[in-house]
Amino acid sequence: MEPRPAAPRPRLCDSLGADQTPSASTLNAARAEARPAGRRAPAVAAVLPAGGSGERMGVPTPKQFCPVLERPLISYTLQALERVCWIKDIVVAVTGENMEAMKGIIQKYQHQRISLVEAGVTRHRSIFNGLKALAGDQPDSKLSKPEVVIIHDAVRPFVEEDVLLKVVTAAKEYGAAGAIRPLVSTVISPSADGCLDHSLERARHRASEMPQAFLFDVIYEAYQQCSDYDLEFGTECLQLALKYGHIKAKLVEGSPDLWKVTYKRDLYAAESIIKERISQHICLVMDTKDENHVGHRLEEVLKDELNHVKVTSRLPCHTGRDLDQIMSEQCYSYVCVNVMTSDFEEIRKLVDMLEESNLSILYPVVVISVYFLDYKSVPFDQKMENLMQIREYAKEVKKRNILLCGLLIYYPQVFYPPQDPSCLT
Ligand SMILES: Nc1ccn([C@@H]2O[C@H](COP(=O)(O)OP(=O)(O)OP(=O)(O)O)[C@@H](O)[C@H]2O)c(=O)n1
Ligand SMILES: O=P(O)(O)OC[C@@H](O)[C@@H](O)[C@@H](O)CO
């Protein structure tokens, strides 16, 4: 099949380097350009092979279900695809024995647009089963055939909308497209006796990654023609499109984060990346509107010390609007600075609103409650008794993925209101 007549190529491919995260306006412009005037956007679906056993991970649990920050790895990949509003269906291939576990994950993390199919004994067979579900071949299937289908490994959680848009746009034009990355190690070809036969020039070769995208008919027909050998031993969908559909896939430079979780070290790396991403914003919540509140000093110190982190502050959270705004910013780290109140009613209000926002369903939310107590005006034992209650409360809210801890700063009256934020850091 000849590539379709070149539609106007969206600027996204020209204006963004592989490692840049596009602004919403860039993505919107590319979305608009990928949809030539008067033409409807292509119906796009995704197939996620998730039926492997993860032998190289070396643990009993298949790696797609291994926990990262107490949440299964596959849930992060589903979340990444769900963030893309123009992917209408996400078909996940899992083994029969993991089907119930997968349904539980979908329910617990409130994943949407997910359909499950039985995995095959190889990755290609799992993908083929996903395509069959989309083809409408199955009588009870509620899925409609898409124009373009994305294929993405369930163990590649760090996929962003820009590369998905790039491969889909390219697949519409060329019939197939796939993300690639520079090789880290040189590829060599060993001889039969285990010695070097030759090596490939690294600069002229690339690693094939995911996501990949195809005109649905191209890849579905390729799978239907596949030999058993291909289905059993093949690892490259682009090759199937070439071999059976004579389609030379467009290769799209992907970002460094497209790697596949394969070994245990990859899980540690994934956890570090996720922790780094959710700690990019700290919100200080203060218990009074006093402009001299020590929380403002702390805000200045944090902004100086953590210049890569967004630090915001909010007035007392009795105004729901304030917290609604915080929730919309997807902030997962809160420091509540209490100089007047010593019970933790304010903390309860914040925790209740965090819960209502469902923020802690996907990621752990950290709340540090800082108390300043003037030891001349308050008998230590009386106040400590109050504050010790925070321990019990912390145990209770941890079940809801909210990590609460208290920091007590016992100071003499002379500092009040404590002006020296260094006592907070
Ligand atoms: N029969 C299979 C084998 C693999 N996969 C999926 O294909 C993706 C990439 O495959 P790979 O990294 O090889 O996963 P595993 O086969 O599980 O890993 P291993 O080879 O270490 O066992 C994974 O999401 C995996 O779950 C699949 O859907 N069905
Ligand atoms: O071979 P594995 O099953 O480990 O992983 C599949 C990979 O080969 C595949 O995801 C990319 O290389 C792109 O095709």
Image: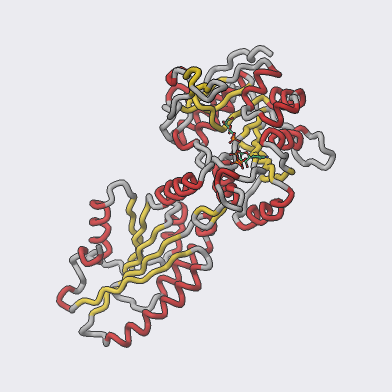
Residue located at (76% from left, 34% from top)? 132
Ligand 1 quadrant assignment: top right
Q: Of residues 59 and 399, which is closer to you in this image?
A: 59
Q: Which of the 4 image quarters holds residue 108?
A: bottom right
The correct choice, above or below, for 278 with respect to 422 in the image is: above
Asked which colour scheme the image uses, the reply is secondary structure
Left or right position of 369 against 354: left
For residue 59, say whether it is visible: yes
Residue located at (69% from left, 35% from top)? 127
Residue located at (82% from left, 38% from top)? 138
Q: Quadrant of the N terminus?
A: top right
Q: Percent from the top left, x then y, of residue 253?
A: 48, 26
Q: How many marks?
A: 0
Q: Percent from the top left, x then y, of residue 148?
A: 66, 28
Q: Percent from the top left, x then y, of residue 100?
A: 71, 55
Q: Of residues 58 and 67, which is closer to you in this image?
A: 58
For residue 83, say whether it is visible: no
Farthest-out residue, left? 414
Q: Quadrant of the C terminus?
A: bottom left
Q: Of residues 332 and 276, which is closer to you in this image?
A: 276
Left or right position of 220 against 267: right
The correct choice, above or below, for 248 with respect to 135 in the image is: above
